[in-house]
Image (cartoon, rainbow, N blue to C red):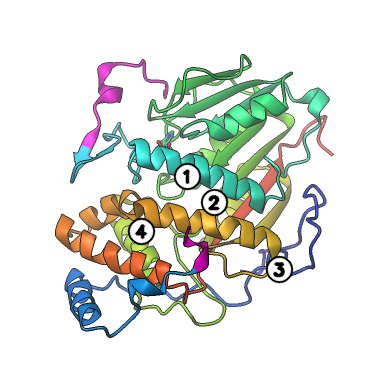
Amino acid sequence: MAEEQTNRPAAVAEPAEPAGPETSPPASSPPAPSAVLPPQHWAEVAQNEEQGDVDADSTIDADNASSTASITSSIFEYRTIHGRTFNSDQGDAQYWGSNDEPQRELMDITHHILTIGLGDKLHLAPLDKAHVHQVIDIGCGTGIWAIDFADEYPGAEVIGTDISPIQPSWVPPNLKFEIEDCTRDWTFKSGFADYIHLRWLVGSIKDWDALCSEAFRVCKPGGWIESHEASSNIESDDGTVDGDSAMGQWGKFFIEGSKKIGSSFTVVEDGTQRKALEKAGFINIQEFNFRNPIGGWSSVPSERKMGPYTKYGLETDSEGFVLFMAHVLGWSRAEIQVYNAQFRRELRSGKHHGYFRQKVVWGQKPGAAAE
Ligand SMILES: C[S@@+](CC[C@H](N)C(=O)[O-])C[C@H]1O[C@@H](n2cnc3c(N)ncnc32)[C@H](O)[C@@H]1O
């Protein structure tokens, strides 16, 4: 992807550490897509496990310690899959992650991880605090980013939108939440927002061009948009994540499942954010790529900070991430559990130096105030 640039933007505070993988993305290409291994494979692996073939649990590594819906009862009608709650489909809107307490907790932990990845910043777009009045966080989840942003920008009015009513009620006075499906026409008037933030909508959007075109309409001339997305593939630069391992197969659930639900999980790999921003008309587009390691294997201090949290999240509730997609692929709960057990075993072994790619792309709406 020729247009991918990896320079750390001036807006990011340089952590006091040597330039390393955090400032330059992995040289390796994303893994070639292939079919997800059948569930029987994991039953066989588990059987071999019992015979002591592969990683044993005893090898746990040290760091293991018109879109606004009125809030009708239908919004609270969650779908239950194997005992976990998920948002029920609302029109085209569909979200693959569980919205129950374990996953909400992980959204908040993920926010911490991603903030570290951005050099302890909430955004990379060069916002001028004195001129940021209206801010929208699309698909805000638990609202954790919006809460932090509202605290940091007390002069701004921040609105977080989501299809799932999972936001807290005690929030900063300059923040409110609305139930809104971002895949439909937005209810915000044209030229309303100084800054529009979108994070981790991968797998939820069928038409990124339409989404960014709507954001362009709602953005003020001179205003900014920022899109932060993650790859679902777990990669390694040293060959420790094999394509047929449970970690190597992780992304395949999402990529294969997304073919069925029609919302891409290869947004990072395909350069979708930049393409959609350009097509919508945004200018001054920049991007920043970083690795989100799993476990404390990296020697780069910021990656070393992120890794144990990521590993904790995946170990604590890998099921909440993968359940919907595995279910879409026709796996039974027992089959999913066997896979997850192997996935956790690999995580705990500390032998696999996996990471997720993260890509942040930001751009400005042209107009009088644009640079
Ligand atoms: C992985 S979470 C990310 C939450 C938040 N952006 C963050 O980074 O902490 C994705 C969120 O997008 C929401 N979502 C999915 N489809 C949506 C849609 N069509 N409109 C609005 N929100 C949506 C989900 O309900 C979920 O809360």
Is 68 magenta? The answer is: yes
Residue position marked by numbered label 4 in the rendering: 254
Q: Nearer the viewer, residue 286 or 200?
A: 200
Name the residue type under label 1.
Leu
- Give the residue at x 69% y 54%: 287
- Tell me the CA gap for discs 3 and 1: 24 Å
Q: Quadrant of the C terminus?
A: top right
* Left or right of 114 in this view: 336: left
Q: Which residues are magenta?
A: 62-79
- Give the residue at x 38% y 30%: 164
Instruction: Tell me if label 2 and label 1 are in contact, CB under 8 Å.
Output: yes
Mark 4, Cα crowd under 10 Å, few <14 / some 14-19 / many 20+, is many
Mark 3, Cα crowd under 10 Å, few <14 / some 14-19 / many 20+, is some
Q: Earlier in the sequence, mark 2 or mark 3?
A: 3
Q: Earlier in the sequence, mark 3 or mark 1?
A: 3
- Tell me the CA gap for discs 2 and 3: 17 Å
Percent coordinates x, y for residue 354 in the rendering: 50, 70
